[in-house]
Image: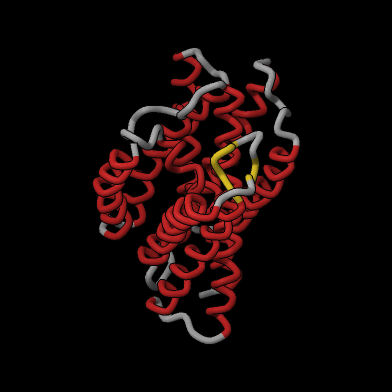
Amino acid sequence: MLLQRILTALVLAPLVILIILLPSTGIFGAIVALAFLAAWWEWAQLSGLRSRGGCIALLVVTAAVFIMLWLVHDTAWTPWLLAAGVAWWLLACLWLRRFAYAAAPTHENRVLKLIAGAFVIFPAWVALVSIHGREPHGHWWTLLAVLIVWASDIGAYTSGRTFGKRKLAPQISPGKTWAGAYGALVAGILVAEVGGWLLGVRGIAMLALAVLAALTVTVSIVGDLIESLMKRQAQVKDSGSIFPGHGGLMDRLDSVFAALPIFAAGLLLMDI
């Protein structure tokens, strides 16, 4: 399984990097929207929406929302949309503390999970487009945001395997440890500092970037745990099977969805 995961990552990583660096922000946003629609389908399944017609209708509505968000993406609405994403992930921490909440497969709980999914998907898309369209170096800042999450995943795996004993959230994701979380923080901050330096960040802004990276990684762990909670309540191992050894798109994007609004909001506040 580990070899399969590595081989899949070696194929996907260059493709993701090219998609971030080469196209204009408009084309990039459209490509990301398609990927997010596929992830949204998986979230709907985890939420308990089994009707194919219902899922298709949901995708059509979601595509329309993406179009509307593009029309307002570079306006005064952007900070508010990012703030909605940040607020959601703070609220998600409370859900992790009460992990049995909304577990029953009722209509009300399904609606609640779909609403939660909207706060997962849409602010993350707005964040990506916002970062990608920044001047200067928006493409590279977008890549740095993704690399921070990737590095934190690798740091968490390595540190957790080597030092992990104390469980982080055993009722939700038994494989995650506090050592893994610390390793994720170290790796994410290191990548952010190196990337920031290459992008011309200097002085006190480097310290601010380190703090932002720490917050970004912390919330990315929350995103990972929320998806684990969704899978546990849905009684499935993976959100899908599109990527050999990695599961579905939600399995690959859960941390990214959570990290992006935090990172984008931080860049706006720091004005770098």
Foreground of the two, 42 or 69: 42
**Residue at figure coordinates x 40%, y 41% from the top left:** 33
Q: Is residue 139 left or right of residue 91?
A: left
Please give the count of numbered marks on the rendered protein.
0
Q: Is residue 37 left or right of residue 219?
A: left
Above or below — where is 15 with respect to 200?
Answer: above
- Report x, y in % for residue 14: 25, 53
Q: Quadrant of the N terminus?
A: top left
**Residue at the extreme bottom of the image, as rendered:** 203
Q: Is residue 104 left or right of residue 242?
A: right
> Does residue 129 appear anywhere in the picture?
no
> Does residue 151 appear anywhere in the picture?
yes
- Report x, y in % for residue 213: 54, 65
**Residue at figure coordinates x 41%, y 64% from the top left:** 144
Q: How is the image coloured?
A: secondary structure
- Report x, y in % for residue 241: 36, 28
- Report x, y in % for residue 243: 33, 34
Foreground of the two, 233 or 130: 233
Foreground of the two, 106 or 118: 106
**Residue at figure coordinates x 41%, y 27% from the top left:** 240
Above or below — where is 123 with respect to 192?
Answer: above
**Residue at figure coordinates x 56%, y 41% from the top left:** 120
